[in-house]
Amino acid sequence: MNLPTSVRLVEVGPRDGLQNEKQPISVADKVRLVDDLTAAGLSYIEVGSFVSPKWVPQMAGSAEVFAGIQRQPGVTYAALTPNLKGLEAALEAKVEEVAVFAAASEAFSQKNINCSIADSLQRFVPLMEAAKAADVRVRGYVSCVLGCPYDGEIAPEQVASVARELYAMGCYEVSLGDTIGTGTAGATRKMFEVVARDIPRDRLAGHFHDTYGQALANIYASLLEGINVFDSSVAGLGGCPYAKGATGNVATEDVLYLLQGLGIETGVDMDKLIAAGQRICEVLGKANGSRVARARLSR
Ligand SMILES: CC(C)(COP(=O)([O-])OP(=O)([O-])OC[C@H]1O[C@@H](n2cnc3c(N)ncnc32)[C@H](O)[C@@H]1OP(=O)([O-])[O-])[C@@H](O)C(=O)NCCC(=O)NCCSC(=O)C[C@@](C)(O)CC(=O)[O-]
């Protein structure tokens, strides 16, 4: 398989990166992060979530964040919506694209969205209809594709079955998430090979957390499988509230470094990206989770 000449990076830092932070983060700081990421050349930014504030309090101000950002043409500003109520709130906030999220594991589905996989898919049906009527595209996520914190191993066929449902109900792209970062390059290739029997490879994306330090290897393995969309989080921010011990998403800076080394175009400016990541880390009082950023900043 030839490597692609370009890759689309889906920046999930403002959502996946911040959702697990316990300390309050002001709307102004979130807006600044999104604007910095826009300035760095990211063409797709997940800005927030319209979920229950009781479940994920950090995302409660997402409508204000959407109202505050400077939207630039050619950039998609998206939000997570778990149900019709979330979609309605997102539409009110003039969100251009939303994402629904299901899991390949029953236990994770219960912990994350308080229902079975089948019920979650049912819940998405009216959401998909309303999104279509509003001309809003919907992206789909499947969590725990390479392992679950509660159920352990997950068969690729189980991932394929959930991904197939999301694709069939109208998700234009399905992002496959290694929520707890236990996946290996071999397991990643096998999983994409099985899922791609039903869904075209250019409709799939990879979403890797770096808990076991395997995320870049898994992205390279995915590139070899013909995948050319990857989710990542500036400064490696993040962790899932319902996956204890899971570290952040793979750092966007580190993915960019990998892709630049392969001669793959993304449209992202490394210096501006590093500045965006470092700024939010200073706001949070956290060490920068990107190895590339740390190395560059210490020069
Ligand atoms: C799905 C629910 C709502 C079910 O939660 P529930 O408690 O079963 O729902 P409910 O319908 O009984 O509603 C309970 C309360 O929530 C309200 N409510 C209901 N819906 C909404 C909404 N959309 N926005 C705001 N409020 C809402 C509703 O109005 C009610 O309010 P009350 O009457 O108690 O005051 C809940 O479980 C939830 O919000 N879960 C979100 C979990 C989440 O955001 N997890 C993180 C994102 S997924 C992820 O990170 C993985 C990913 C995507 O990155 C990929 C990977 O790495 O794997």
Image (spheres, rainbow, N blue to C red):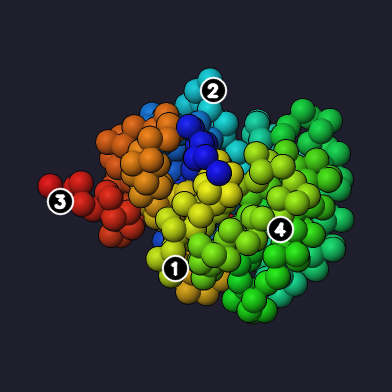
Q: Earlier in the sequence, mark 4 or mark 3?
A: 4
Q: Secondary structure at mark 1?
A: loop
Q: In the rendered structure, which amino acid carries the disc numbered 1?
A: Thr
How crowded pointer 1 is (Cα within 10 Å; few <14, some 14-19, many 20+) is rated as: many
Q: For the residues labelled 1 and 3, say whether their Cβ atoms are less than 8 Å apart.
A: no
Q: Please tell me whether mark 2 or mark 1 is closer to you in this view.
A: 1
Q: Please tell me whether mark 1 or mark 4 is closer to you in this view.
A: 4
Q: In the rendered structure, which amino acid carries the disc numbered 4?
A: Val
Cα separation between marks 2 and 3: 33 Å
In the image, residue 42 sits, relative to residue 289, either above or below, namely above
Q: Nearer the viewer, residue 266 or 137?
A: 266
User: Is ligand 1 closer than 8 angstroms to the Cβ of mark 3?
Assistant: no
- For label 2, the residue is 74
In the image, residue 4 sits, relative to residue 254, either above or below, namely above
Q: In the rendered structure, which amino acid carries the disc numbered 3?
A: Ser
Q: Which mark is residue 211?
A: 1
Q: Earlier in the sequence, mark 1 or mark 4?
A: 4
- For label 4, the residue is 194
- For label 3, the residue is 298
Q: Earlier in the sequence, mark 1 or mark 3?
A: 1
The answer to whether residue 277 is left or right of residue 145 is left
Estimate the x, y position of residue 144 in percent, counting from the top left: 63, 66
Cα separation between marks 1 and 4: 24 Å
Cα separation between marks 1 and 3: 24 Å
Q: Nearer the viewer, residue 185 or 167?
A: 185
In the image, residue 243 sits, relative to residue 58, either above or below, namely below
